[in-house]
Amino acid sequence: MGRGPLIILSGPSGSGKSTIVDRLLREDGWNLRLSVSATTRNARPGEEEGKHYHFWTRERFLQEVARGAFLEWAEVHGNCYGTLRQEVDPFRDQGIGVILDIDVKGWEQVRANAADAVSVFLKTSNMDVYRERLVRRRTESEEAIQRRLAAARAEEARAGEYDYIVINDDLETALTHMRRIVGPLFERKSHA
């Protein structure tokens, strides 16, 4: 049994990463799981501990950073986010694919430590789509939305460094593109 693939999915807030990941995880034929990140931000309505994130205090998060427990971590919009090694390595060693929903800074750290990772940047065709999606969430102030849009511009400037770019203006079209990327990762493994 070969090692499970590592798939990195990055993109600005409002690009649809969570929706794409949820749909991919429901696909038949792929032994794929989402790595649950740790964060110091508060849970949003409907988010569950251990399912959406590990919601930690800043103190605990920084203790785990010092212990070397993270594959990657960063401070974003005033909160810490990170991928725990225990959420990735044991599963990949069992042949299970792991998808990481992480930002550009996290991708840089993982890329330096996992040469076999496949990276996908998810984006929309323009900033108006991001803004509309962020407003629809009703979880952000106007000031926070403006910060996220500025961050989106900076993140998009790095999109060309990823293995693939997928435009998510239409969910089904974006999913088709993602299937074309993810599917062969499992076919290669099964024929190895």
Image: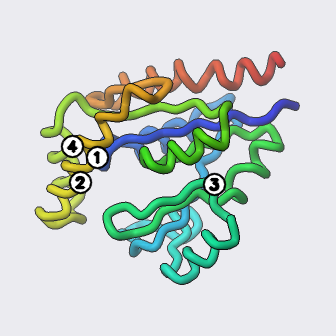
Query: If you read the primary sequence from the N terminus, does the residue marked by circle 2 or circle 4 appear first?
Result: 4
Left or right of 116? Residue 51 is left
For mark 2, what is the residue? 148
Residue 120 x %, y % = 47, 31
The residue mark sitting in front, 3 or 4, is 3
Are circles 2 and 4 on residues that touch, CB within 8 Å? yes
Measured Cα–Cα span from mark 1 to mark 4:
5 Å
Query: If you read the primary sequence from the N terminus, does the residue marked by circle 2 or circle 3 appear first?
Result: 3
For mark 4, what is the residue? 130
The kind of secondary structure element at disc 3 is: strand
The kind of secondary structure element at disc 1 is: loop
- Give the residue displayed 48% in from the left and 39% down from the top: 9
Q: Amino acid at mark 2?
A: Arg
The quadrant where residue 121 appears: top left
Are circles 2 and 1 on residues that touch, CB within 8 Å? yes
Measured Cα–Cα span from mark 2 to mark 1:
9 Å
- Give the residue displayed 37% in from the left and 61% down from the top: 76
Residue 177 x %, y % = 44, 21
The residue mark sitting in front, 3 or 1, is 3
Q: Decide: few, some or many residues near mark 4? Use Cα within 10 Å; few <14, some 14-19, many ≥20.
A: many
The kind of secondary structure element at disc 2 is: helix
Report the disc number at residue 71. Answer: 3
Are circles 1 and 4 on residues that touch, CB within 8 Å? yes
For mark 1, what is the residue? 14
